[in-house]
Amino acid sequence: MSIQRPGGSFLLARIALLGLANGLLWMAVVPPWQTPDEPKHYEYARLMAETNRPVAFATEAEAADPELQAWILASMDEHHFWWFGRAPGYDPTRPAQRFADVWVKGMHTALYRSSPAFYWLVSRVQPADRLSGLYAGRLLSVLLAVVVVLASGAVARWLFPGRPFVRYGVPLFVALHPMFAFTHAGVNNDSLLNALAALTFMWLVRSLIRGVNGVRLTMLVITLGLAIAVKRTGVFLLPTAAMALLLAFAGQARHRWTTLAVGLLAVVALLLAGWRLAQAGGFPAMPQPWRDLGWRYFFNEPDQPARMAAVLQSPAGRRILLEYARRMHDTFWGSFGWDVIRYPQLVYVAFGLLGVLALVGLVGLAARRRLNWPQGAALATAAAAVAGTIFAAAVFFGTYLTEAYAPPPQGRYLMATMIPCALLLVTGLGGWLSPERERRALGWLMAVLLFLDVATLLGLVIPYYYG
């Protein structure tokens, strides 16, 4: 694949095809059930396909369809899941017949209360054969990854049309990122959230560049609303959108910094008003069905918000949050299977140093005033989205530290911020380059990304599952 001069969308289309081919390769290589929670995600979608109705949440220990759960468990056994994966409650002397026999603390039913949006899409492409249906769901996830690649290309082109390293490096990073490809190689509602979050960020960047109008605002509301409706982790888009829109309005104003200051004061006032309303009993005054729906969708237990506050107030909790942030960095770059296939620790250190190099490059661009207002605003919004997601995930999972099985935060939650991550990293690295070196550096970037992707498959994933 040769590096062509900037212009048109031909090269972006080729990058998208490269991302599609890479996703199909990962989809085929990873054995059935070996992506996080894939058995439970597929159960939800298959239930909707076979019953043609929404899934009814029954009880902590009851399956909506015991026969379907038994089939999935038998298929997992057939494909050696217990050898390669993780199952805290598995006993090989007593073959499991339901998810409650394998997953502890009712976690087998946790997905039944999730939004049906992604599972409805998967249910629409289900053939009669169940195992073929798993791969049909995987194919849908791969196609959604291509949406993210195309959206990232649009964002990079709008922001840096004359910078080939950033313009094409951002979609290349998305298309060839091993962990991103792995995340979209399985049946998981993260894939639809990632696509909608990418489209939301795309409309935010368009608004920063061209201003806010009715069409852009409508598209933004649609994609943002759908993202939150698909999965609760999409809530990070609300403060992200608020920040970007505030910067967009400030960019259009005659007195830019005054407008920005007034807008920030207005946001603070709204937050204080909301806090006072909550303190005065605003939430408890809501109708009980609304309260129940809110708790069940956004939290696992009614007391989880209080436990989150306790984590933030505890010195030990704050130290653990830093460790969780480091873990999210590592697993963003690579943690395959059920968090069982990882790079050597020195590789994660190298990725960290790469991030530091990009950060210094971003600071250099800002210090030399080589960023215009839309570019700087987009990068600031991207940084806020990434930092907010890491913080929210670390605090959320910090509430389970006292449990016997404490699930840690995973880097796949950062895949919803894939465009912000790619934009920050590639733009920062590009800050070290002179214009005449960008085209050659883009070739090196593509070579390094291809090497990382192929080396991950041939050196880690394939030997683990097939060696």
Image (cartoon, rainbow, N blue to C red):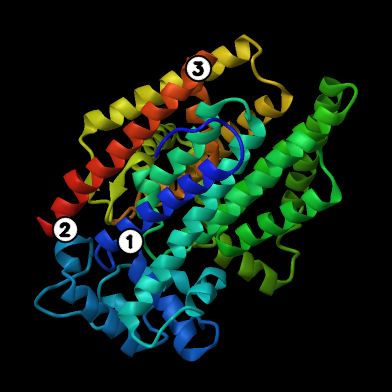
Percent across and percent down for residue 27 are 33, 61
149 vs 299: above or below: above
- Looking at the image, is mark 1 or mark 2 earlier in the sequence? 1
- Disc 1 marks a residue whose amino acid type is Met
In this rendering, would 157 be left or right of 93? right
The answer to whether one can see residue 108 in this image is no
Q: Nearer the viewer, residue 52 or 129?
A: 129
Describe the element under mark 1 as helix, strand or loop. helix
Gap in angstroms between the C-alphas marked 3 and 2 = 39 Å
Q: Residues within 10 Å of mark 2 (few under 14, many from 20)?
A: some
Which residue corresponds to the image point at 31% horizontal and 57% vertical from the top-left? 25
- Disc 2 marks a residue whose amino acid type is Tyr
- Disc 3 marks a residue whose amino acid type is Gly
The answer to whether one can see residue 103 in this image is yes
User: Circle 1 sits on which residue?
Assistant: 27
User: Circle 3 sits on which residue?
Assistant: 361
- Looking at the image, is mark 3 or mark 2 earlier in the sequence? 3
Q: Residues within 10 Å of mark 1 (few under 14, many from 20)?
A: many
Q: Is label 1 or label 2 in front?
A: 1
Q: Which of the numbered marks, if any, corresponds to residue 465?
A: 2
Q: Nearer the viewer, residue 265 or 207?
A: 207
Which residue corresponds to the image point at 50% horizontal and 27% vertical from the top-left? 165
Gap in angstroms between the C-alphas marked 1 and 2 = 13 Å
Percent across and percent down for residue 29 are 25, 59
Percent across and percent down for residue 301 are 50, 62
